[in-house]
Image (cartoon, rainbow, N blue to C red):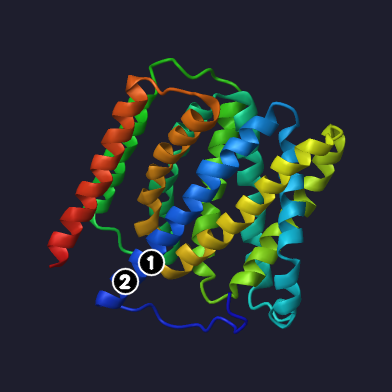
């Protein structure tokens, strides 16, 4: 990571904009592999033993340990944060979204949580238009809607039990979308500063509820817990880089691919074999995304 402050610059246009979008997609895919593939598997395994609030709090503390050298290296930028209140607002949304997500994992099946979370791209694109003034083409809207239809195929009618887990997923979607939009609006902020605000803020917000549900941690369990913190922090950096480079409306539909990563992780680590409707839904999602991207490239040419 560069020790130089990130410079505020106008959004590039034309080919430069497309190049930035492509690079942003690569960063968000890296985040997806680290978090959806690695961290989620560890959280699911440890969530059978430890409460969700405790996992979120430990995750943030471990992440803070990993970035301590960066905090010292970028101490000047941290002392001169450009948008402290905007960062606090972003982290508050992130904390609510992540805690709700971990809580949902404990109350609903993992596949259900992931499937319902795929409504986020539609909300994110709408917020990108309303808040950031981004332009979303009809093709992107159609592609996102078709991809969401693929998510609905994965959910059998009446297959989701109505409980607080659904409310937790709703909070994850709404506040996660707000955090994404605010991350994009802070593209002129130093990346390390944003990571520090995220990690420290997450620890502060989840500290009190974690104390009330705390369970003693077995010595060997610290290994996967360290893995959760490391993967989460690395994924956070990739996520921030992605949304500093690319338009939120471009990156939002890519999030549908996490169903493939999560399904693969479930099969590899837990022996979970998805049924036909999950496979069909995932195929519909991929077709919608790839077709939309192809048609947009053709239209651009």
Between 105 and 88, the residue placed more toward the observer is 105
Q: At 59% across and 58% down in the image, what residue appears?
A: 234
Determine the CA span between mark 1 and mark 2. 6 Å
Task: Give the left or right position of residue 258, taking residue 34 as reference.
Answer: left
Residue 225: x %, y % from top left = 72, 43
Which residue position holds label 1? 23
Which residue position holds label 2? 19
* Res 159 → quadrant: top left
Cβ atoms at labels 1 and 2 below 8 Å apart: yes
In the rendered image, the quadrant that contains the N terminus is: bottom right
* Res 51 → quadrant: top right
Between 203 and 215, the residue placed more toward the observer is 215
- How many marks overall? 2
* Res 22 → quadrant: bottom left
Residue 233: x %, y % from top left = 63, 56
Instruction: Name above or below for residue 254 compared with residue 210.
Output: below
Residue 173: x %, y % from top left = 51, 42
Residue 179 in view in this figure:
yes
Residue 133 in view in this figure:
no
Task: Give the left or right position of residue 285, taking residue 110 as reference.
Answer: left
Residue 3: x %, y % from top left = 62, 81
Task: Give the left or right position of residue 50, taking residue 94 as reference.
Answer: right
Neighbour tally class for label 1: few under 14, some 14-19, many 20 plus, Cα within 10 Å: some
The secondary structure type at the circle numbered 2 is helix
Q: At 60% across and 34% down in the image, what residue appears?
A: 168
The secondary structure type at the circle numbered 1 is helix
Neighbour tally class for label 2: few under 14, some 14-19, many 20 plus, Cα within 10 Å: some
Task: Give the left or right position of residue 53, taking residue 98 as reference.
Answer: right
């Amino acid at each position: 990571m560069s020790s130089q402050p990130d410079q505020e610059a106008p959004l590039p246009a034309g080919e430069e904009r497309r190049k930035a979008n492509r690079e942003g997609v690569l960063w968000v895919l890296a985040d997806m592999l680290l978090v959806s593939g690695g961290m989620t598997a560890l959280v699911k395994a440890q969530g059978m033993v430890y409460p969700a609030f405790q996992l979120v709090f430990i995750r943030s503390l471990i992440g803070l340990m990993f970035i301590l050298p960066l905090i010292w290296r970028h101490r000047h930028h941290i002392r001169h944060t450009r948008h402290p209140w905007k960062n606090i607002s972003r982290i508050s949304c992130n904390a609510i979204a992540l805690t709700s997500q971990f809580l949902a994992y404990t109350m609903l099946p993992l596949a259900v949580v992931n499937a319902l979370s795929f409504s986020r791209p539609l909300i994110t694109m709408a917020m990108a238009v309303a808040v950031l003034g981004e332009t979303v083409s009809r093709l992107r809207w159609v592609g996102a809607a078709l991809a969401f239809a693929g998510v609905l195929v994965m959910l059998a009618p009446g297959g989701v039990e109505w409980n607080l887990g659904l409310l937790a997923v709703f909070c994850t979607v709404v506040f996660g979308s707000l955090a994404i939009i605010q991350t994009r609006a802070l593209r002129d902020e130093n990346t390390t500063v944003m990571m520090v605000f995220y990690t420290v803020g997450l620890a502060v917000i989840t500290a009190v509820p974690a104390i009330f549900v705390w369970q003693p941690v077995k010595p060997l369990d610290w290994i996967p817990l360290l893995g959760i913190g490391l993967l989460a922090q690395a994924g956070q950096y990739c996520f921030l880089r992605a949304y500093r480079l690319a338009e939120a409306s471009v990156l939002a539909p890519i999030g549908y691919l996490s169903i493939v990563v999560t399904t693969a992780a479930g099969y590899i680590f837990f022996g979970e074999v998805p049924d036909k409707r999950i496979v069909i839904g995932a195929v519909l999602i991929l077709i919608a995304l790839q077709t939309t991207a192809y048609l947009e490239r053709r239209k651009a040419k």
